Image (spheres, helix red, strand yellow):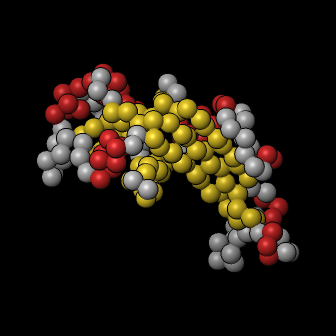
Amino acid sequence: MNAIRNEKLTVSDQTQVETFITKARIGHLGVTDGDVPYVVPLNYAYYNDQLYFHGANEGKKVRIIKENNQACFSICEEYGTMVDPVPAKTDTAYMSVMIFGEIEEVTDLDEATQAMQMMIDKYVPGYYERAVRKSHVQNYRSSVGASTAVYRIAPQTITAKANPLDEAIAFFSRSTRP
């Protein structure tokens, strides 16, 4: 992992980082369209040290990835606000991870099917009685006719930081106070 400017916020416990990545629900894929940033929120799955996401096999995101497959995938969860008598010291409790790497389309049907199954297990656990079939991944078409593509980011660099919630100074509005 790369060093973070405010070292006291660095999370170096690999198990904590991987647990966070695995359980968090939304990530933001950042890519570059020429010299213009493009960020899109995505569902994803993380397993075997790889990050997977899926989407249509055409469109702006796919065009950008084909032109420049360098990516930053950002995941963050906010846990509350902490107050201080000095307004400028009011702070947010959070954890965030940034994954840098190259995006590759998954062309192996077994791997793509496994990635889709991991996403289903994450977002709708126990809903489907049967596992995803290869034929479904291979033949699925959206309502606009696009087929599904599965992508992988093999992390080259991961940074993580956190600012834990201090319950003693956690802010609750009068209407939400426990």
Tell me where residue 76 appears, x and y as whole percent: 58, 51
Relative to the observer, which residue lies in front, 112 or 62? 62
Q: How many marks?
A: 0
Looking at the image, is 12 positioned above or below residue 167? above
Residue at point 73%, 41% (across, down): 3
Tell me where residue 160 appears, x and y as whole percent: 66, 43
Relative to the observer, which residue lies in front, 57 or 25? 57
Relative to the observer, which residue lies in front, 143 or 3? 3
- In the picture, measured across the screen, residue 20 lies left or right of residue 145, that is right
Q: Is residue 30 visible?
A: yes
Looking at the image, is 123 positioned above or below residue 135? below
Q: The C terminus is located in which quarter? A: bottom right
Q: The N terminus is located in which quarter? A: top right
Residue at point 41%, 37% (across, down): 103
- In the picture, measured across the screen, residue 53 lies left or right of residue 1, that is left
Looking at the image, is 134 positioned above or below residue 2? above
Q: Residue furthest front?
A: 35
- In the picture, measured across the screen, residue 77 lies left or right of residue 165, that is left
Tell me where residue 88 appears, x and y as whole percent: 79, 73
Q: Is residue 19 visible?
A: no
Tell me where residue 62 appears, x and y as whole percent: 30, 45
Q: Image quadrant of residue 128?
A: top left
Q: Residue furthest left?
A: 145
Residue at point 34%, 48% (across, down): 64
Residue at point 59%, 53% (across, down): 77
Relative to the observer, which residue lies in front, 99 or 171? 99
